[in-house]
Amino acid sequence: MKNNYIKLMSSLKTLSKIDDETLMEMSSNVQFRNFNKDAIIHHAGQIENTINFLVRGTVRMFQKGKSKKDDHTIYVFFPGDFFSAYPSYINQKPSDVSLEAMNEVEIISVNRPVLEECYRKNHKIERAGKIVVEKFFVEFFNLCVILSTMAARDRYLWIINNKPEYDSIQLKHLASLIGIHPNSLSRLRKELKDKGKL
């Protein structure tokens, strides 16, 4: 747990000049949580009340379909990312999305009341929190633009060139994110490999 919190401290210090003493004071207010593969970390319809730091594993944000195979992957978080069902967290309204562990996951969570109190006491922590949320929305917006304006082939190439870690997730989830059928993505990858573009 100590090593995991050091990872969180290091990440926060890159966002804002927070001193070690303040960060150590925060350590008593965080939760260390583990989830098995396919576990739901946050359910759609619930109000999100935590901001999480992903220590190990991969988490996907998705919207439920009529069946599990129809679920739509919206975004994927990787180690070192802060994640939450952000719109629900900010607006304190039921969430439209769920968060699922894609493999064995370790996270550090901070509840909203605790974080709000930290913001009130320390503006450097408040600034770090603001940067975390802004960073997500900028990256999410950029991804939405790419996915809505490019052809499938270009969408895939953009993602693996700009976010190569996406190529490590299950084909069905990557296909869902890009907006094509898994079989189509499989054929596309083979075609690109045959042409030496992968």
Image (cartoon, grey):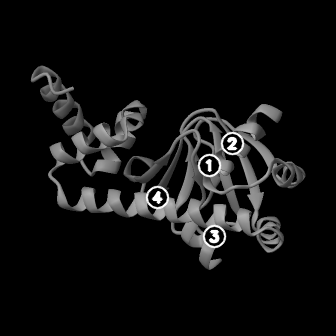
Marks 3 and 4: CB-CB under 8 Å? no
Q: Amino acid at mark 2?
A: Ser
Provide residue 47's location: percent of width, then percent of height. 66, 70
| Residue lying furthest left | 195
Can residue 93 be spotted in the picture? Answer: no
Q: Residue at x 21, y 30 (%)?
A: 189
Marks 1 and 3: CB-CB under 8 Å? no
In the drawing, what numbered circle is on residue 14?
Answer: 1
Q: Amino acid at mark 1?
A: Thr
* Camera-side residue of 32 and 16: 16
What SS does tag 2 mark? helix
Marks 1 and 2: CB-CB under 8 Å? yes
Picture layout, residue 85 above or below residue 194: below
Provide residue 17's location: percent of width, then percent of height. 69, 55
Q: Which residue carries the number 2 mark? A: 10
Q: Nearer the viewer, mark 4 or mark 1?
A: 1
Number of marks present in the image shown = 4
What is the CA distance from the residue labelled 3 to the residue labelled 4? 19 Å
What SS does tag 3 mark? helix
Q: Nearer the viewer, mark 3 or mark 4?
A: 3
Can residue 168 be spotted in the picture? Answer: yes
Q: Which residue carries the number 3 mark? A: 89
* Camera-side residue of 87 and 98: 87
| Mark closest to the chain's N terminus, 3 or 4 | 4
The quarter of the picture where the N terminus appears is top right
**Residue 192 horizontal side relative to residue 18, left or right:** left
| Mark closest to the chain's N terminus, 2 or 3 | 2
Q: Amino acid at mark 3?
A: Tyr
Q: Which residue carries the number 4 mark? A: 64
| Mark closest to the chain's N terminus, 1 or 3 | 1
Label 2 Cα crowd, 10 Å radius (few <14 / some 14-19 / many 20+)? some
